[in-house]
Amino acid sequence: MKRHCACCHGSNLLAARAVDKRDGRAMTLCVQTYANPNAAIFKGVREATLQASVCRDCGHVMYFASHR
């Protein structure tokens, strides 16, 4: 499936990796969601790595969660 920019609808996208640089080390960004967020314990944490696409035409950045 070909993705298009959400802003300009262009198809000239560049795949990118979202990283956080701390102490000179690159760390991949991730997001966490919960299967049962109202539980006091055992919330069922789910983790996904963030991937990014950058539109070469307008510079818009889009993030996507990809499960590890």
Image (tube, rainbow, N blue to C red):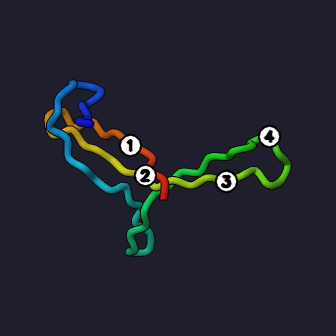
- Using residue 45 as the reference point, say whether residue 43 is left or right of it: right
Q: Residue furthest bottom?
A: 24
- Mark 2 vs 1: CB contact within 8 A: yes
Q: Tag 2 or tag 3, which sits nearer the N-term?
A: 3
Instruction: Give the residue number, with chain letter if any, for mark 4.
Output: 38
Q: Residue furthest top?
A: 8
Q: Tag 1 or tag 3, which sits nearer the N-term?
A: 3
- Using residue 25 as the reference point, say whether residue 34 is left or right of it: right
Residue at disc 1, secondary structure: strand
Instruction: Give the residue number, with chain letter if any, for mark 3.
Output: 45
The amino acid sitting under disc 4 is Asn
- Mark 3 vs 1: CB contact within 8 A: no
Q: Tag 3 or tag 4, which sits nearer the N-term?
A: 4
Residue at disc 2, secondary structure: strand
Give neighbour class at mark 3: few <14, some 14-19, many 20+ (Cα, 10 Å).
few
Mark 2 to mark 1 CA distance (whole Å): 6 Å
The amino acid sitting under disc 1 is Tyr
Mark 4 to mark 1 CA distance (whole Å): 26 Å
The amino acid sitting under disc 2 is Leu
- Using residue 58 as the reference point, say whether residue 68 is left or right of it: right
The amino acid sitting under disc 3 is Val
- Mark 3 vs 2: CB contact within 8 A: no
State the image coordinates of residue 52 (x, y, percent, origin top left). 33, 47
| Residue at the spot 19% in from the left edge and 41% down from the top edge | 13
Task: Choose mark 3 or mark 1, whichever is in front.
Answer: 3
